[in-house]
Amino acid sequence: YLFTDYFLNNSKEFILCTPKDIKDFYFKNDNRVTIHFIAKTMSKDFKFTKSDKTMSYHDPFNDDLKAKVGHPYTIYKKDFVSIEAEIEANAIHEELKKDDEQPF
């Protein structure tokens, strides 16, 4: 659900992130969710693979433009969002934009 929501609210087709990025953004104050647990879930349950090489990337959950260095996982939008869901989300966003427009 976290990635579905993220991709429905962003135009990115994929993101690069580490388990620490996910922990810091979604579970910062939840000590029950550890970086190790997130890494295990990403690898074993979702079958994501992380980069073999250390690389520079930008944290997708943070607007800070400073590059990070690590072994991020590549997570694709197509794995979490159907075309139908994306069309529906875009229609909702358009309706919300209309509601925010000034009447004059």
Image (cartoon, helix red, strand yellow):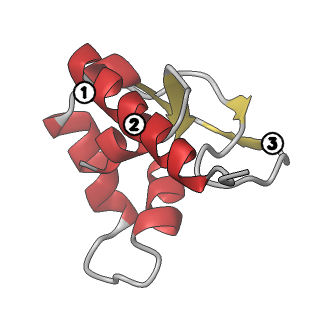
Q: Is residue 78 left or right of residue 68?
A: left
Reading the chain from its start, which is encountered first: label 1 or label 3?
3
User: Residue 69 or 98: which is nearer the viewer?
Assistant: 98
Name the residue that disc number 2 marks. Answer: 8
Task: Determine which of the numbered discs, if any, sits on residue 85 in the image.
Answer: 1
The reply to whether dot 2 and dot 1 touch (C-beta < 8 Å) is yes
Residue 48 visible, this angle: no
CA separation in Å, label 2 and label 1: 8 Å
Q: Label 2, label 3: how many angstroms apart (C-alpha)?
A: 24 Å
Between 49 and 60, the residue placed more toward the observer is 60
How packed mark 1 is, by other alpha carbons closer than 10 Å (few <14, some 14-19, many 20 or more), is few
What is the crowding at mark 3: few (fewer than 14 residues within 10 Å), some, or many (at least 20)? few
Task: State the SS at label 1.
Answer: helix
Using the image, determine if residue 27 lies above or below residue 39. Answer: below
Q: Is residue 12 visible?
A: yes
Task: Point out the tag, 2 or 1, that comes first from the N-terminus.
Answer: 2
Q: At which x and y percent is residue 35?
A: 39, 62
Residue at 84% across, 46% down: 65
x then y, percent, for residue 104:
73, 51
Which is more N-terminal, label 3 or label 2? 2
Residue type, label 3: Ala
Q: Which residue is mark 3?
A: 67
- Tell me the SS state at disc 3: loop
Left or right relative to 77: residue 83 = left
Q: Position of residue 25 (x, y in %)?
A: 51, 64
Q: Is residue 76 above or below residue 29?
A: above
Q: Secondary structure at mark 2?
A: helix
Mark in front: 2 vs 3 = 2
Instruction: Tell me if residue 34 comes above or below residue 3 in the rendering.
Output: below
Q: Name the kind of residue labelled 2 in the image.
A: Leu
